[in-house]
Image (spheres, helix red, strand yellow):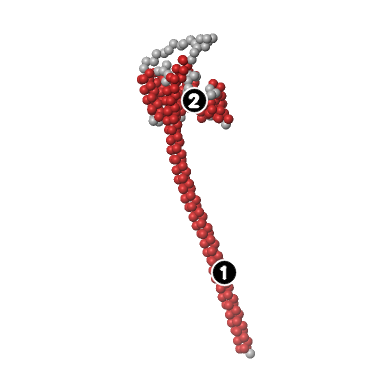
């Protein structure tokens, strides 16, 4: 009887051990599957992040390339505009120099017409004493030489030549023009203060000269660039009052409307 009870007990213990082993084996299997699942999820998330990072890098690289291309395009535009500006300024200089030559050809005719007009009986004209010019041909050559320097864009040399001419020939018929071009040379050299001083000499000393209206217009331009809006407006208004029929007055009206 005792033997049977011992056998039964042994069987019960063996069964319990088997159940426990099976339970532990099942738990171990479950832990392995969970670990594999977590590793797989981590791998998927890592790949997604890598893909996102790679796409971001590609997009950034594309943006950098686009910026480089845009910068290159803008640099090309700046170079083109600079060239066009220089070409326009050179054409403008040539135009004014050519216009200066034409005006100088007309000045003797205009003077002859004035002298040919009959004097009014009620207002007899008293002829002013004439200044004797030492050598008009030499003066013309000096003036043309200074003008050629300006045309060649040798601005410093041109300014010096015009200033020398004006001092050497204060009574010459070409001196007002030399003084005018002296102002233009200073303006081209970005020295508006000297340009204003030179052009004021033209406007004040030779108010009847053909370049006097343009001298006032140039003064207003320099005042505007020096942020003297009030002074520029006053100069333009003075230009309109003194020379309402001049070409410079037309430009002055347009500027005052802005």
In this picture, is 114 found above or below 257? above
Q: How many marks?
A: 2
Report helix, strand or loop for mark 2.
helix
Residue that lies at the very extreme toward the bottom in this rendered image: 1
Picture coordinates of residue 250, whole percent (x, y): 54, 27
The residue depicted at 48 percent of the width and 19 percent of the height is 206
The residue depicted at 51 percent of the width and 59 percent of the height is 51
Label 2 neighbour load within 10 Å: few <14, some 14-19, many 20+: many
Q: Quadrant of the N terminus?
A: bottom right
Residue 214: assigned label: 2
Residue 34: assigned label: 1
In the image, 97 versus 120, the foreground residue is 120
The residue depicted at 42 percent of the width and 28 percent of the height is 98
The quarter holding residue 87 reads top left
In the image, 18 versus 188, the foreground residue is 188
Judge whether residue 144 can be spotted in this image: yes
Picture coordinates of residue 170, whole percent (x, y): 42, 17
Residue 216: assigned label: none
Picture coordinates of residue 195, whole percent (x, y): 47, 25
The residue depicted at 61 percent of the width and 88 percent of the height is 3
Report helix, strand or loop for mark 1.
helix
In this picture, is 121 found above or below 148? above
């Amino acid at each position: 009887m005792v033997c049977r009870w011992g056998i039964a007990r042994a069987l019960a213990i063996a069964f319990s051990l088997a159940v426990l082993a099976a339970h532990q084996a099942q738990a171990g299997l479950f832990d392995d599957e969970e670990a594999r699942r977590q590793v797989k999820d981590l791998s998927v998330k890592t790949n997604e992040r890598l893909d996102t990072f790679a796409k971001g890098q590609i997009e950034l690289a594309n943006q950098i390339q686009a910026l480089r291309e845009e910068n290159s395009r803008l640099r090309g535009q700046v170079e083109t505009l600079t060239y066009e500006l220089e070409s326009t300024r050179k054409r403008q200089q040539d135009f004014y120099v050519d216009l200066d030559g034409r005006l100088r050809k007309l000045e003797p005719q205009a003077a002859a017409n004035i002298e040919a007009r009959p004097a009014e009986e009620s207002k007899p004209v008293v002829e002013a004493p004439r200044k004797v010019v030492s050598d008009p041909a030499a003066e013309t050559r000096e003036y043309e030489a200074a003008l050629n320097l300006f045309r060649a864009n040798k601005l410093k040399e041109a300014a010096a030549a015009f200033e020398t001419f004006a001092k050497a020939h204060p009574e010459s018929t070409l001196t007002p023009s030399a003084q005018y071009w002296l102002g233009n040379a200073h303006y081209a050299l970005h020295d508006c203060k000297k340009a204003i001083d030179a052009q004021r000499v033209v406007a004040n000393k030779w108010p009847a000269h053909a370049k006097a209206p343009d001298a006032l217009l140039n003064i207003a331009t320099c005042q505007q660039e020096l942020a003297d809006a009030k002074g520029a407006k006053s100069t333009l208004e003075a230009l309109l009052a003194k020379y309402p029929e001049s070409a410079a007055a037309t430009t002055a009206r347009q500027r005052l409307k802005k």
